[in-house]
Image (cartoon, helix red, strand yellow):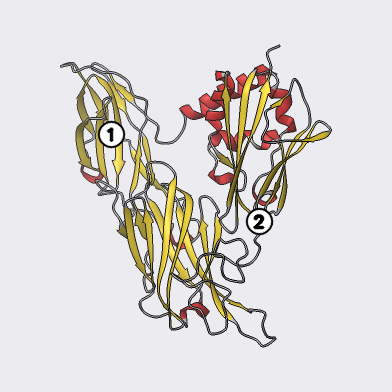
Amino acid sequence: MKNIFLICLTLMAVLFTFSACHSEKMETGATDVTGQLSLASMKMEVDLKVDTVYPQSRAGVDVSNFLLTIKNSQGEQVEQYTYSEMPEIISLPVGTYTVVASSAEAATNGFDVPFYTGSTEQFTIKENELTEVFALTCRLANVMISVEYDEELRKLMGEDVVTNVKIGDNSLDIPSSETRKAYLIAPASAGSMDITLKGTIDGESVTEVKRVDNVQAGQYNIIKYVLNSVDDGTNSNVGGNLNIAINIDSSMTSSDETVGVNPGEEPGIDDFPTDGGEEPGDGDGDSDGDGEGGITSDINITGKKLGDSSFDIDQTQTITGATTLIVGIEAPAGIQNLKVKITSAGNDDFNGIGEGLGEFDLAHSDSMNENAQAMIPVLGLPIDDAVLNQPNLDFNISKFTSMLAGFEGTHTFKITVTDNQGKTESKSLVINVPKK
């Protein structure tokens, strides 16, 4: 069984080799001996697959003014041209190089300013030889954002309503009248995005903040505001307080996070604490103290079955062979994210497999890396609709146990669940495989 995992590890290494925009650092020294680089046959294209929500925006991008930069193996710029003016043949010292294309010198924050970039794999210039570069694909390298309001909500909105979006140190105000796509500089790795709605709605001042995790380059987030009517339960007449739901929908991660926004407390209604008023949890509709009404039960992650019995997930479990192993997950508000990270102590081979899979989200398989997308379905784990919005779930890794038994050491499955109210609970399933 150990050989099965070693084969998988080898396949992962192959996948990494062919990952997009990858460049391997190699050493090269300065020399007077030269060779030639041919760019005559190089074609450049822009991959717009992130723009799946609005098909009409998939028009071709004009690449004539893209910057084409040739860098040596130390990452230093050797030559730079615009794509429309680049020479067909370039003489370069013998060595290793990469061609990098970008739509601008750097990404910026603003409207209608997408930043596309891409690079070739490294290539070698050899003495008195002609090296050709044939193709280069650029992809969106910042975060694209749109804000939408439903018509019922727009009828109640003042002209001062604005959405502020902040990613790290980068921030942008998006007025309610703005229809262009917004772009923010992406974090170096997956980070968080803070969304703040401000302005006058139905004559009341609104300020509400929502945080969205797993924001990264190449992602298109659509912020949707929807007006809901909420009956306070004190009478049978139609009406009640107003509640605004913020739905964050990303074409990359298919996230769908929701938060209630209170546009102001009406007389006789205290279901929602006012901004700057009572402490969270004082409102009658918020028994769990998170500032939101509705379902308030906690998330539970428990040891449901090991062999024929339940087990304590907070204790290390020992296995010596194939067995039933199920973790029970309860999230009454519905699962929004189910993230798993696998690590290993004392076994580099298995730890390497975990690193290759990365932290994967079973609720959003399109956010997984290529290795996880290939491996997870084979292991029989539930994904996408079998996880997303489910109130109960069996995280069944029984298929894992027969393979895991071939890797002695202590292995950890960190399980992190986030529900549709933004609550998060994390548990670590620790498995010990003793030395045979």
Between disc 2 and disc 1, whose residue precedes?
1
Q: What element carries label 2?
A: loop
Q: Residues within 10 Å of mark 2 (few under 14, many from 20)?
A: some
Residue 9 position, x and y percent, is 57, 23
**Position of 159 relative to 326 (above/below):** below
User: Which corner quadrant holds the N terminus?
Assistant: top right
Query: What residue is rendered at 34% in x and 27% in y?
Result: 122
Residue 269 position, x and y percent, is 57, 80
Type of the residue with mark 2: Gly
Q: Quadrant of residue 175?
A: bottom left
The residue indicated by pointer 1 is 39
**Position of 290 relative to 105 (above/below):** below
- Number of numbered discs: 2
The residue indicated by pointer 2 is 334
Q: What element carries label 1?
A: loop
User: Which corner quadrant holds the C terminus?
Assistant: top right
Q: In which quarter of the image is residue 178?
A: bottom left
Type of the residue with mark 1: Leu
**Position of 131 relative to 262 (above/below):** above
126, 385: nearer the viewer: 385
Query: What residue is rendered at 72% in x and 51% in y?
Result: 392
Query: What residue is rendered at 69% in x and 57% in y?
Result: 332
